[in-house]
Amino acid sequence: MSFLSNFHYSILGTNTQERVVFVHGLMAFAANWRKIANRLENDFQCLIYDQRGHGRSFKPDSGYSPEIFAEDLNKITDELGWGSFHLVGHSMGGRNAMVFAHMFPHKVRTLTIEDMSPESDFTMKGYYENMLTHIPTPFANKAAVKEFFDSEFKKSFQAKEPPAVLSTFLQANLEEKADGTYDWRFSKQAVIEITHEGHLKDRWLEVSSFKMPVLLIRGEKSHILKQETYEKMLAVNPNITGVEFAGAGHWVHYEKFEEFVQAFRQFIAQNPV
């Protein structure tokens, strides 16, 4: 059995000279990138996939460090025959993309980091444990999902993110199971392990090592990538170009879809490799 068969993935577009790999964030899945990939597929060949522990990919009991996620992507792209590509990662996917670009720099033509800090944050594990504890999965049906998120969620959980955006994101990650109930697409155990493993150390070594062109995207209202950290990343490595999106929070590619696509296209056009 091939390693690739462990993963749910899609390839859009036919331009094998300009390939892009999109890496989703925590508790997300491949389809979170589909709108972006659809807009780019006439000019790029795009890979979107569910990372381990997420969506319809395999969900092992352990193995959730950024290094293991990077090794997964290396094996996936080897099996697909993708020797080099543009790499885009959001949030946790941004951290995994940083580690991949450090471990396998020969494969990364350009790197786009969307709203992710290289700093470690030991509060993250508790925050996500608390969040998932407050959401009483499985839900009996779709109406029960809507009722909870319309009323109880905002009362019972103090979110760092805008509640409406977080609520939409979380509901998109609930799916109907065979028995008619609604439960997570991801593994709760994996999410908790990722928030622990991903913050055991900072990633400034990786940031300083990049030789490829890097686009660093920050939402002006982000709670993840602080302004001072963003500016430090730009100062640490001259290969990093920064773009801030006014009015956006953490999910820039969702909140500012058109602007995100435009910024990415412009970055690639300015950095022919």
Image (tube, rainbow, N blue to C red):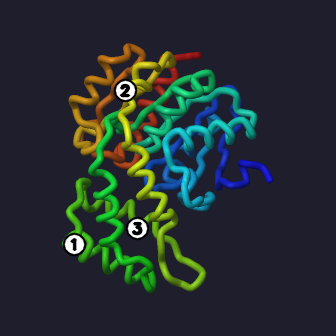
| Residue under numbered circle 2 | 204
| Residue under numbered circle 3 | 171
Could you tell me which secondary element the residue under label 2 belongs to? Answer: helix
Distance between the alpha carbons at the discs numbered 3 and 1: 16 Å
Q: Nearer the viewer, residue 29 or 126?
A: 126
Q: Which tag, 2 or 1, sits closer to the chain's start?
A: 1
In screen coordinates, is 28 left or right of 106?
left
In screen coordinates, is 28 left or right of 231?
right
List the single residue furthest toward the top.
Answer: 238
Q: Nearer the viewer, residue 20 or 190?
A: 190
List the single residue furthest toward the right.
Answer: 1
Q: Nearer the viewer, residue 86 or 34?
A: 86
Q: Position of residue 149 (x, y in %)?
A: 31, 73
Q: Are marks 3 and 1 in contact (CB under 8 Å)?
A: no
In screen coordinates, is 153 left or right of 136?
left
> Residue at the location (51% across, 26% down)?
102
Distance between the alpha carbons at the discs numbered 2 and 1: 36 Å
Above or below, 202 relative to 27:
above
User: Residue 243 appears in which quarter of the rendering?
Assistant: top left
> Residue at the location (62% across, 58% down)?
57
| Residue under numbered circle 1 | 156
Question: In the picture, which quadrant includes the C terminus?
Answer: top right
Tag in front: 2 or 1: 2
In screen coordinates, is 215 left or right of 64?
left
Q: Position of residue 19 (x, y in %)?
A: 63, 32
Q: Which tag, 3 or 1, sits closer to the chain's start?
A: 1
Q: Are marks 2 and 1 in contact (CB under 8 Å)?
A: no
